Amino acid sequence: MRANPNPPPGEYLTAREAAQLLDVQRQTLYAYVSRGLIRSVIRPGQKARLYLRADVERVHARALARAGHGAVAADAMNHGQAIIPTSITEITPQGPRYRGRLATELADEAASFEAVAELLWHGRWEPQAPVWQVTATPRMLVGMVEALRDAAGRESLLEVFALVVLQLGLQRRARRGVDETMHEQARQIIGVLVGCCGLAARDPHYVSMARGERVADALLRALGGEPSPSNRAAIGLMLTLLADHELMPGTLAVRVAASGGATLHACIASALCTSSGMNVAHLYADADAFLAGGGKTALLRRALERHAVGRPLPGFGHALYPQGDPRGRVLQAFIRARYPTLPLLAVCEAIEEVERATGLRVRHELPMVALTRAMGLGKEAASAIFVVARVAGWVAHIEEQRGSGQLMRPRARFVTTLTPESVSSVASLAASNAGLNNQS
């Protein structure tokens, strides 16, 4: 991994400083590096390596967590310590593995979103999963979406989605004699959200799914995309890659709500609200802003300027994938194979040059946003696709949490005041956790 000649003060540590912070011998520090837990960089003309402070502090916090149950709980909330057992999705160096099947392999097989969702829900792989028979959206709900059209701007699209899902749940409860399974309700929620994605199109309005239509095709139509084979394949690819991941804020939210006995619709609404914040949905907006204005040279210049002053690079550096986000690699390969236009190829080349210059590896957001832009979709398209995809995973987590019968209730540790030392410690943890809170 290479760094620019003059890394900003405080972003990196010397071997001595890193070993002291960790309270370990240098051989242990080198072992952490070889295992990919801590990233190191070389400054041109110097032999000594430097070590990324955020990685060192994260490893240190996890070591402290082994001191006792209270520390484990605190670290779990801050650094993603695996405190919730799950058999749904495993995070591996090859990417997320849904019920034993790699998402990247399912993407290579052009698996339908319906098949992926059924795999997450039932644990059975049925590549020929049938088209969902989604109930027609109530006319009142369509009118509600249209009335909220002006409110569904860049800052509040997912909040509008949450309102619609809650209203859908209220209408269902008002109908007597309704006997739908959880998965039937989930399919209807996804169908309604696909229609709501029409609010992210350049001509925003609700777009109902047609009878016998695949989710990917309906979503492309709702977003206002041209129904070409490449565009349809692109939507299907993104839905598969994003169907589930680690326990990020939205997934944790559905589990907390489910443990308290909330309805399916309330659980999904809680996840949508949680995901609407700056740390999740705005990752796509940040990537879009980063790509806007200029070609390869401008993108590379902006990246190096930000890196030189220690500012994060939108779309780069996934803490769970120190060797690179496999989903990002799949999207880049898809772009080269199906969209070999000069602007898109320039983005891929710029990504590779940024990786070589900074040592950071691309996440999935940057190539995904580049792809949706090339498809002629609106700025909110990427986050809308993410939401539709992730509902499949959220439903699986809700069901698993309900089956556990456990009420999620972390302990609180009361403190009278925050001392300067406490504030400094919290700030340090927040800085080292900046990447982990955003791992989608």
Image (cartoon, grey):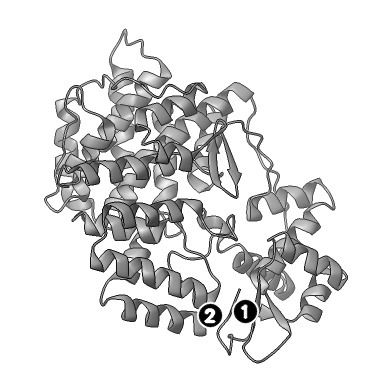
Q: Residue placed at 59% from the left, 55% from the top? A: 320
| 130 is higher (above) or lower (below) than 178 | below
Secondary structure category for the residue under label 1: loop
Please report contact status of discs 2 and 1: CB closer than 8 Å, yes or no: yes
Q: Secondary structure at mark 2?
A: loop
The amino acid beneath tag 1 is: Glu
| First-in-chain label (2 vs 1) | 1
Extreme-left residue of the structure: 203
Q: Left or right: where does residue 230 sit relative to residue 355?
A: left
Nearer to us in this view, 323 or 199: 323
Is 7 left or right of 124, judged from the image as shown? Answer: right
Left or right relative to 92: residue 161: left
Residue drawn at (64%, 55%), measured in percent from left and top? Answer: 78
Q: In this figure, which residue is indicated by the disc labeled 1? A: 11
- Alpha carbon distance from label 2 to label 1: 7 Å
Determine the image quadrant of residue 405. Answer: top right
